[in-house]
Amino acid sequence: MHRQRNFLLVVTLAALAMTPAAGQGVLPANVAVDSEVRSTISIPDLSGAWSLPSLNALEPPLSGPGPVRNRSRVRAGRQAGVSSINQLVGDYTNPILQPWAAEVVKKFGEMSLAGKGFPTPRNQCWPEGVPFVFINRGMQLLQQPDKITILYPFDHQFRQVRMNQLHPVQPSPSWYGDSVGHYEGDELVIDTVGIKIGRFSMIDWFGTPYTQALHLVERYRLLDYDATMKAVAWAAKEHAQSDNPGSGPRPDPNYKGKGLQIQLTVEDTGAFTMPWSATLTFRRALDEWRELVCAENIQWYSGTYSEVPTADKPDF
């Protein structure tokens, strides 16, 4: 892996006053550069393929408001003598939810408990959007000075992050939003607004809804090996773990280097009562990047038919 060099950006007061939508400070690209520190400060090397061992995972933070959690968690299922891995019942009593959003989560949970399943962007082969797409079983980062491209293993999904730029005044809604990034010390910070809402859009596997006010801030940082495994163990208390996921690359069991963690902050005054946060912890991937295509399947989830296009008459 190559190590890129970061530039210390020296800005005027006027430049510092420039902020994107939702008030996140992002430095413009055409600011002055301090040549004395150009060669001494490096950006974190986040490039390459990463594996996410957790299933259905937005991991709760160590403290503070966190994401909707599964009322049928793995531990509860094991105690009852059944597997609850695929039983997605969101905790609609989470205080982050506005009443209407809590009702949506409750409705989907009741469907899951009845064994009916419910449509998601994943099982409908629709763009997953953010932050739902983060729950892929891995990702690959491609770092360039002017942009970062993030590839997700399922169904050829990807995002592009413009570096050291501002959001448009009125961003056109898109599935993965308008993302701008910058480096703060050893962290990559990505700010995203303008996230499109579709028929099956949701925050997570529990059906948590969002509105056009959704605003995400992601902070990517490297963790040493011990801290990475400690974070994975923390996630395992909440979610099933797999070293051989079928929908993403496997983690390298012999790799003792650094892991990668995303700290995610979510704000949406239309759906949530307060900002909340979550984490996702990745290990270095072992496998080559594989092609994983979403095949339209009329029996993808239990008890319900997916909306697969059909012809009125046979082609032959």
Image: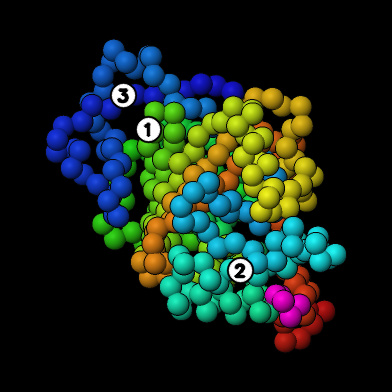
Residue closest to the eye, 198 or 267: 267
Q: Residue furthest bottom?
A: 312
Q: Which quadrant of the rendered structure holds the C terminus?
A: bottom right
Of mark 2 and mark 3, the one earlier in the sequence is 3
Residue picked out by circle 3:
8
Our reading of the magenta stretch's main secondary structure is loop
Report the residue at 63% width, 54% height from top: 57
Image disc number at residue 90: 2
- On screen, residue 70 versus residue 186, left or right, reads right
Q: Classify mark 3: helix, strand or loop.
A: loop
Query: Which mark's residue is nearer the viewer, 2 or 3?
Result: 2
Q: Amino acid at mark 3?
A: Leu
Report the residue at 33% width, 38% height from top: 164
- On screen, residue 211 versus residue 287, left or right, reads left
Q: Can residue 175 be seen in the rendering of this structure?
A: yes
The reply to whether the magenta stretch includes residue 114 is: yes
Region in magenta = 112-117
Q: Can residue 159 be seen in the rendering of this structure?
A: no
Is 295 located above or below residue 288 in the figure?
below
User: Image quarter for residue 42?
Assistant: top left
- On screen, residue 214 versus residue 198, left or right, reads left
Report the residue at 55% width, 21% height from top: 2
Residue picked out by circle 1:
184
Residue closest to the eye, 196 or 257: 257
Q: Residue furthest right?
A: 81
Query: Which mark's residue is nearer the viewer, 1 or 2?
Result: 2
Query: Which mark's residue is nearer the viewer, 3 or 1?
Result: 1
Q: Amino acid at mark 1?
A: Glu
Of mark 1 and mark 2, the one earlier in the sequence is 2
